[in-house]
Amino acid sequence: MAKRALITGITGQDGSYLAEHLLAHDYDVFGLVRRTSTLNFERIKHIQDQITLVPGDMTDLTSLIHVLREAQPSEVYNLAAQSFVPTSWSQPVLTGDVTALGVTRILDAIRATDSSIRFYQASSSEMFGKVREVPQTEDTPFYPRSPYGVAKVYGHWITVNYRESYDLFAVSGILFNHESPRRGLEFVTRKVTHHAARISLGLANELRIGNLEAQRDWGFAGDYVRAMWLMLQQETADDFVVATAQTHTVQQLIEVAFNCVDLDWRQYTVQDQRFMRPAEVDLLIGDPSKAKASLGWQPSVTFEQLIEMMVKADYDQLKAEHNL
Ligand code: NAP
Ligand code: G4F
């Protein structure tokens, strides 16, 4: 019999890549989707006839219980979250409700319906925040710097707690930033690659940006969903850092993206206070040794390849949209 998996956050960047990965491994894939007045299935429209979408919301425990009863999954991947860091300052209570308490709701729904379900929690390198050591490992203490980071720390520890309290197979993947052509336009990589493509096509004339010095460990989302799946195929439940072990500044990101379209980034980049954060995460760089040793996982796409892939996708899409 085919394995059944439920993905919360299936309409997001990672949800779409994970759904493709599970379909390729012959899973029956169910996706939790919340009601919206206009459909937002852009990232999954190419696989929509191969998956089953079920209505629900991470703020509504009853809906989660119904979804689990209907889908009867053996694996649940909890990717749903308010995931944009700046929004977590303007909507801190909502962020806590969805990104933190949502984890308890789905864990409790699992306990109430079928405690043999294996559970993956999408934890984040944002939990390291003002980093206590470099590089960051599974043992590095957390020091979150945003309401989003604080909510993810809660989600991480409630996952560990349910594993230890109720013997659930519940794991937390501490994933560093991962990007793709499907990344939301508000995140810095996609904002930069989209603007580089727009400027080179004559559709825009500047990139307004915040902190150029922040450093991130950026990888490809397609590689990272493979790590999520591997974590649920192990004999014992454990937590893993997933990262490339390379870090780059936002300025380097802009340089690489603008080089892809033969533009000098300095001529088009304007620093704008509106994109600065009240508290910044200055430096993230992960040590994925444990994932490599135990899961056999390693990234397959370099930073330069990732940015080139994203610029090209934006360029091709804009050209087609504007008949250029
Ligand atoms: P994303 O593109 O922002 O997707 C978030 C998903 O969550 C969307 O499908 C969204 O649905 C859904 N969602 C939000 N609120 C919900 C609610 N109340 N009920 C049900 N669904 C809800 O995020 P992503 O980049 O794919 O990231 C996936 C997960 O990994 C998130 O938990 C994120 O915090 C975490 N993470 C991401 C990264 C990264 O670099 N990408 C790194 C570490 C951890 P709508 O489409 O309806 O909005
Ligand atoms: O792309 P970002 O918005 O991602 P951030 O804040 O690192 O969070 C992402 O990665 C986390 C994993 O570490 C996830 F958990 C989270 O859900 C999300 O996917 O910003 C990256 C850096 C920041 O230092 C920010 O200050 O880029 C800097 N930045 C500079 N100018 C900007 C901008 N970020 C954005 N979004 N927009 C700017 O104009």
Image: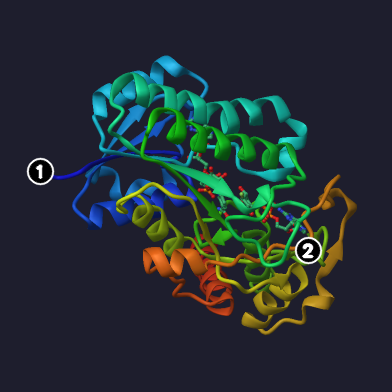
Q: Residue furthest top?
A: 62
Q: Amino acid at mark 1?
A: Met
Give the percent coordinates (x, y) of residue 231. Answer: 38, 53
Location of the N terminus (image quadrant): top left
Left or right: 251 as drawn, with respect to 55: right
Question: Which sits in the foreground, 139 or 1?
Answer: 139
Say what secondary structure mark 1 lies in.
loop
Disc 2 within 8 angstroms of ligand 2 (CB)? yes
How many marks overall?
A: 2
Q: Is residue 262 above or below residue 121?
A: below
Q: Is residue 155 above or below residue 283?
A: above
Mark 1 is surrounded, within 10 Å at the Cα level, by few (under 14), some (14 to 19) or many (20 or more) other residues, namely few
Give the percent coordinates (x, y) of residue 153. Answer: 63, 40
Q: Image point 45% across, 28% down: which residue? A: 165
Quarter assignment of residue 255 = bottom right
Label 2, label 1: how far apart the Cα atoms are: 48 Å
**Label number found at residue 214:** 2
Say what secondary structure mark 2 lies in.
loop
Give the percent coordinates (x, y) of residue 35. Answer: 45, 25
Q: Earlier in the sequence, mark 2 or mark 1?
A: 1
Q: Image point 57% across, 37% down: which residue? A: 157
The residue singled out by tag 1 in the image is 1
Q: Image point 29% across, 44% down: which residue? A: 48
Can residue 324 be seen?
no
Can residue 143 be seen?
yes
Location of the C terminus (image quadrant): bottom right
Mark 2 is surrounded, within 10 Å at the Cα level, by few (under 14), some (14 to 19) or many (20 or more) other residues, namely some
Structure colour scheme:
rainbow
Q: Amino acid at mark 2?
A: Ala
**Label number found at residue 311:** none
Give the percent coordinates (x, y) of residue 23. Answer: 25, 52
